[in-house]
Amino acid sequence: MSPVLQPHRIELDDVVLRPFEWTDEPAVAVALRDRDVLRWAAGTAVIRTPADRRAKRWLETRVDGWSRGNAVFAIADAASDYVLGTVSIRDVNRVPDQALVAYWVSPAARGRGLAARALDAAARWAFAKDGLALHRLSLDHALVNEGSCRVATRAGFQLEGTMRDYFVEPTGQRHDSHLHARLATDQLVPAGS
Ligand SMILES: CC(C)(COP(=O)(O)OP(=O)(O)OC[C@H]1O[C@@H](n2cnc3c(N)ncnc32)[C@H](O)[C@@H]1OP(=O)(O)O)[C@@H](O)C(=O)NCCC(=O)NCCS
């Protein structure tokens, strides 16, 4: 059974990581109009939903994700609370002491290293004894998604190997994918270094 997680906030300087709310639907809708978010991070169920209902469909499994073992953070502007992206830690303890991570950033908020900073902060909380007390976090990205590879590496997720034909687009196109992981015992790499 999935663990029930206590919703959590993480304050960074200019952004806050916080649970999603239904009022975030317009901001999520903007992100889900981006080709790369749809291609790499939205999920098949959302892609197959008509465009005008995708944000609602996406939020359905995120707003209450915490009660089903998924720590789903919005990356929100600290001043306006507007959603700029997301980082999620999902399937917490499905494999004991482990979880999977995923992220996207809205096109207008890209280019300032937000995903790596949010991923690093979320990972630190996930490893903390008063956080999720996990030991290993892993992620995958299609090899052609070089920006995601940079995000993972910058946030301290070491490259562990290549999974052949791992990612399948709704079109059926298959992509080799990198597996990256960060352990609680890894030497912490400050984001931005
Ligand atoms: C991947 C993503 C989250 C990065 O957003 P971001 O945090 O704003 O990233 P930035 O634009 O600040 O770039 C981060 C790094 O990636 C590099 N990068 C960004 N886009 C790149 C590209 N197309 N090719 C190569 N490198 C790229 C940047 O140069 C930067 O490198 P640095 O750390 O050496 O300075 C964002 O592009 C996105 O949401 N993409 C679509 C969804 C997605 O791919 N999610 C991940 C699924 S595995």
Image: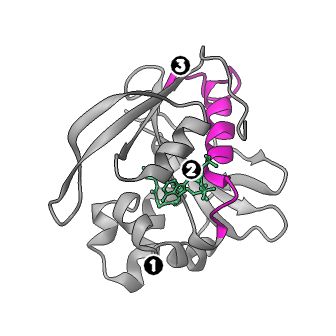
Disc 2 marks a residue whose amino acid type is Val
Of badges 1 and 3, the one in the foreground is 1
The C terminus - image quarter: top right
Is residue 31 visible from the viewing direction of this image? Answer: yes
| Residue 112 among magenta residues | yes
Task: Name the residue that disc number 2 marks.
Answer: 87
- Quarter of the rendering containing residue 51: bottom left
- SS for dot 1: loop
Disc 1 marks a residue whose amino acid type is Arg
The image's mark for residue 176 is none
Residue displayed at 41% across by 58% down: 41
Task: Name the residue that disc number 3 marks.
Answer: 135
Query: Can you tell me whether the CB of the residue at mark 2 lies under 8 Å from the nearest atom of ligand 1?
Result: no
Q: Give the spatial CA distance, label 2 vs label 1.
A: 18 Å
Q: Is residue 89 above or below residue 161?
A: below
Residue displayed at 65% across by 17% down: 187
Is residue 102 visible from the viewing direction of this image? Answer: no
Q: Are marks 1 and 3 in contact (CB under 8 Å)?
A: no
> Of the residues under marks 2 and 1, which one precedes in the sequence?
1
- SS for dot 3: loop
The image's mark for residue 33 is 1
Please state the extent of the stretch shown in magenta in the rendering: 109-136
Whereabouts is ligand 1, in terms of quadrant? bottom right
